[in-house]
Image (spheres, rainbow, N blue to C red):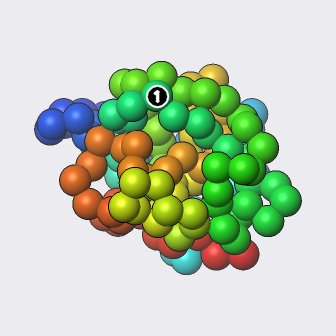
Amino acid sequence: MLTAALSAASTVVTLSLAPTAQAADPGRPPAAKAQHQVQPGERTAIVYYRLRSRTRMVSTGNGCTEHPKTTCDLVSTLDKGTMIEPFCQQPGDTIGTNTWWTLGYGPANTYGFVPNWDLDYPHNKLPNVPRCVG
């Protein structure tokens, strides 16, 4: 597998030339569906975003997939600088001035939503991260 990494500001981009279907981690919980389904053999770029402040990662249960909010069950409290691997993003409760939340993986395969307000990225929505669907 050939891997290249690029660090710009606080965003780390990792390009992997291995097919996504072969790189799946069987230890991870099933993810919510994204609008774009990766096909076997399709090449993908995995982008990691760094948290700019300490934040809560919340679960996808109890209606939180449709509308993430701070009252969703706590998965983990993540420290500033923690890297998040996004899967998809969804509007939810407003944090700061941003209504978008990212569903993704954190350290030790933690899985849940983090508010985009807490990600070190200058815009409300992340680029090339699809919206979560059902």
- Residue 81 sits in which quadrant? top left
Is residue 126 visible to the viewer in this orientation of the structure? yes
Q: Along the horizontal axis of the image, is 128 left or right of 99?
A: left
Name the quadrant of the C terminus: bottom right
Front residue (pair 131, 38) = 131
Mark 1: which secondary structure? loop
Q: Position of residue 22 (x, y in %)?
A: 59, 46
Q: Position of residue 130 (x, y in %)?
A: 47, 69
Q: Reply above or below: 70 against 111.
A: below
Looking at the picture, does residue 79 appear above or below residue 33? Answer: above
Q: Position of residue 112 (x, y in %)?
A: 65, 46
Residue depicted at 66% across the width and 68% down the height: 67
Number of marks in the rendered image: 1
Residue at x 46%, y 28% (from the top left corner): 54
Q: Nearer the viewer, residue 94 or 132?
A: 94
Report x, y in % for residue 111. Answer: 66, 41
Answer left or right for 3 relative to 30: left
Residue located beneath label 1 in the image? 54
Q: Left or right: where does residue 130 sit relative to residue 23?
A: left
Residue drawn at point x = 55 percent, y = 77 percent:
35
The single residue placed furthest to the right in the displayed view is 62
Label 1 crowd (10 A; few <14 / some 14-19 / many >=20): some
Seen from the viewer's position, the closer of residues 13 and 120 is 120
Amino acid type assigned to the residue bearing label 1 in the image: Arg
Q: Residue furthest left?
A: 8
